[in-house]
Image (cartoon, grey):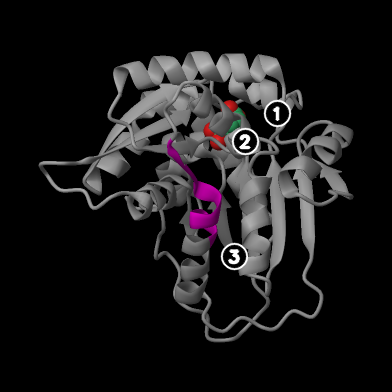
Amino acid sequence: MTESTNQTQPPTTTKPLTIGVFDSGFGGLTVLRALLPLIPNAHYIYLGDTARLPYGSKSRETIARYAVSSAKFLHEQGADLLVIACNTATALALEDIQQALPIPVIGVVQPGAHAALAASTQPTPDAPHHVLVLATAATVQSHAYTHALNALGLEACEKACPLLVPLVEEGWTNHPVTDDVLKIYLTEALASAPATQTLLLGCTHYPLIEPAIHRTLASINHPLTIIDSAAATARATAALVTEHFPNPATIDHPTTTFYATDSIEKFQRLGSNFLGQPVTEVNLVDLGG
Ligand code: DGL
């Protein structure tokens, strides 16, 4: 199944569009950040499933259960279209979510793979372009990125980086420990994939450490083009909106409503870093275990 669905017909009457954005935590706010200026005529509802984060170290069954309940919550709150901003949830549970909801659903893996293709030198069967994907352990185990990149004629190597999410959550985005950890991961990955030309950030948290990644790559003499799927996902979402909601009502005062399943205070504090603007009002919601 592709990352977008045609489960709805374009509505005959216009109503304001509400876009749901879901992530296991704060990281998906980088996708919301890209969506807001690109699709300004919409209300947004964002859910960070912070009580059950991280998804990236859990089994497929657990990730699917958490992701489907989160997606259903956003649908119940009035989402007309759902963006799965979480790489792990997209990689492991996209089809489960699409089957559970009667609205268009889009994930981040396909847009990320297309962004890597757009950044690549023209691949040919004799000289394929090589992409290194950094992601959570669950995303890497699913090989969703490898399948998406191979389908576009790109070679893929995936590297699980389980320590990076906690470091970013700790706010250590510009910290020597993070640089040291990155150096180990990148050196290991590039030793097994020396032909790598492009680095795809396959996790919501990694855009926050993009400067540290550039710095580390420079220190090991292996500069690479870095791709972040947030902008590509926003563009793909805009195309999906045009397809399914060609004529939404004009909204004079668009709203963004935040929900989190754990600490409001932490969501406000960390979320602001990801969104690039203050996250003020956050609603606490209990989605169970
Ligand atoms: N949102 C997850 C992702 O993009 C990272 C955090 C987690 O493991 O839940 O893969």
Residue 195: horizontal and vertical position, in percent? 27, 29
**Amino acid tagged 1:** Thr
Looking at the rendering, the quadrant in which ligand 1 lies is top right
Helix, strand or loop at mark 2 = helix
Q: Quadrant of residue 8?
A: bottom left
Residue drawn at x 72%, y 21% is 175
Name the residue nearer the viewer: 196 or 206: 196
Helix, strand or loop at mark 1 = loop
**Amino acid tagged 3:** Asp
Residue drawn at x 77%, y 41% is 273
Q: Which mark is residue 211?
A: 2
Helix, strand or loop at mark 3 = loop
Residue 56: horizontal and vertical position, in percent? 54, 25
The residue under label 3 is 80
Q: Are marks 1 and 2 in contact (CB under 8 Å)?
A: yes
Name the residue nearer the viewer: 26 or 79: 26
What's the magenta region?
A: 224-234
Residue 226 is a magenta residue: yes
Q: Would residue 260 be visible to someone looking at this image?
A: yes
Gap in Å between the C-alphas at discs 2 and 3?
Answer: 35 Å
The residue under label 1 is 173
Q: Tell which circle, 1 or 2, labels the residue nearer the N-terminal end.
A: 1
Q: Are marks 1 and 3 in contact (CB under 8 Å)?
A: no
**Amino acid tagged 2:** Pro
